[in-house]
């Protein structure tokens, strides 16, 4: 087995991220650049992001392949395009409003060398709350590596979903990103876990920006994504399908309540109760909704 570091492609996806590009790109400049290629895809931004990115890549001495869309496409379609345009043995994907900590690239490469069976690699990280300007370490107490399929099926989070790095061969074997689904990561993780173990690096090496205008803060989008995901993977969940589906819907329901969108929250909760009305957490969420209506 060769100990040479595998080549690595960093796939950057940008959509109106002008305020965040400097942080993202300068963090890339601090990484090990040996046999690293950078691909930047602008998803039809209207804020001048491509021009800012070109200037920053030039200032940082980072060669980058620049791609663009004439009109916005879904996340999965964008990642598939980036994958097809790249060549690295390893593939790291990142939204350009997020950024790596120093040592991310070196850690992913080392993990790939020492764990040849792993199909993808994860690490710890931080949540950066944009609206408050605060950074909080992600709780990694339950993170682990190896076979995580059962953990995913029972609704656990055995690793951080941001900052993943994949073996190209593993991505291609499972069909890469499913462009029919609104939410891409949950589906890809499940398909990978059915075939490969994951290797988790227990270092905080990525920062995930959370803001009120991101997709994860949109309860309608999240609920729609869960509908598509559970429809696709009903067989994988088996007898747990209804309970896991209902439990997952609590997330967007709570977001909707927090946003004061009580009619939307009621619709999401009603769907969850139809699926599995015996979940005590679901009843607690319903009580939370009721209190907001009084």
Image (tube, rainbow, N blue to C red):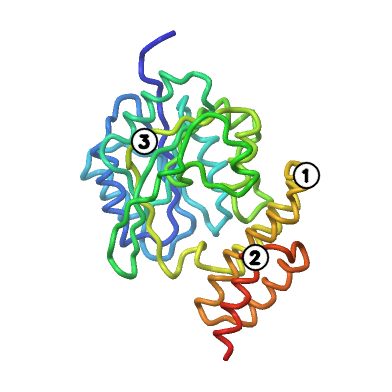
Q: Which residue is mark 2?
A: 280
Q: Is residue 11 left or right of residue 168?
A: left
Q: Which residue is mark 3?
A: 202
Mark 1, other Cα within 10 Å: few <14 / some 14–19 / many ≥20: few
Q: CA distance from mark 1 to mark 3?
A: 32 Å
Q: Residue at x 41, y 18 (%)?
A: 114
- Residue situated furthest left in the rendering: 59
Q: Residue at x 26, y 50 (%)?
A: 55
Pick whichever of labels 2 and 3 is earlier in the sequence: 3
- Camera-near label (1 vs 2) is 2
Q: Position of residue 189 (x, y in %)?
A: 58, 40
Residue 238 badge: 1
Mark 3, other Cα within 10 Å: few <14 / some 14–19 / many ≥20: some
In which quadrant will I find the C terminus?
bottom right
Mark 2, other Cα within 10 Å: few <14 / some 14–19 / many ≥20: few
Q: CA distance from mark 2 to mark 3?
A: 33 Å
- Camera-near label (2 vs 3) is 2
Is 11 or 127 nearer to us in this picture?
127
Q: Position of residue 249 (x, y in %)?
A: 64, 63
In the rendered image, the vertical position of residue 144 relative to residue 48, given as above or below:
above
Pick whichever of labels 1 and 3 is earlier in the sequence: 3
In the rendered image, the vertical position of residue 147 relative to residue 284, given as above or below:
above
Cβ atoms under marks 1 and 2 closer than 8 Å: no
Total marks shown come to 3
Quadrant in which residue 143 is drawn: top left
Q: Position of residue 293 (x, y in %)?
A: 58, 88
Classify mark 1: helix, strand or loop.
helix
């Amino acid at each position: 087995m060769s100990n040479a570091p595998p080549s690595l492609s960093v796939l950057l996806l940008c959509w109106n991220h002008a305020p965040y590009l400097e942080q993202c790109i300068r963090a890339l400049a601090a990484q090990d650049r040996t046999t690293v290629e950078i691909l930047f895809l602008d998803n039809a931004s209207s804020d001048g992001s491509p021009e800012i990115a070109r200037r920053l890549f030039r200032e940082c001495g980072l060669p980058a392949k620049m791609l663009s869309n004439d009109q916005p496409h879904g996340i999965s379609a964008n990642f598939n395009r980036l994958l097809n345009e790249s060549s690295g043995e390893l593939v790291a994907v990142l939204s350009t409003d997020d950024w790596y900590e120093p040592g991310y690239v070196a850690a992913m490469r080392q993990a790939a060398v020492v764990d040849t069976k792993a199909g993808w690699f994860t690490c710890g990280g931080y949540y950066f709350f944009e609206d408050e300007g605060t950074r909080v370490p992600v709780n990694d107490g339950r993170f682990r590596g190896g076979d995580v399929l059962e953990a995913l099926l029972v609704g656990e989070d055995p690793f951080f979903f941001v900052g993943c790095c994949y073996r190209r061969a593993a991505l291609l074997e499972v069909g890469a990103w499913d462009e029919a689904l609104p939410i891409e990561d949950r589906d890809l993780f499940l398909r990978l876990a059915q075939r490969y173990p994951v290797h988790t690096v227990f270092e905080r090496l990525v920062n995930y920006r959370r803001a009120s205008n991101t997709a994860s803060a949109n309860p309608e989008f999240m609920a729609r994504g869960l509908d598509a995901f559970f429809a696709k993977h009903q067989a994988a969940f088996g007898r747990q399908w209804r309970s896991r589906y209902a439990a997952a819907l609590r997330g967007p329901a709570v977001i909707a309540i927090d946003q004061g969108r009580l009619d939307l929250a009621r619709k999401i909760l009603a769907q969850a109760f139809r699926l599995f009305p015996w979940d005590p957490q679901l009843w607690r969420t319903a009580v939370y909704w009721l209190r907001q209506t009084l």
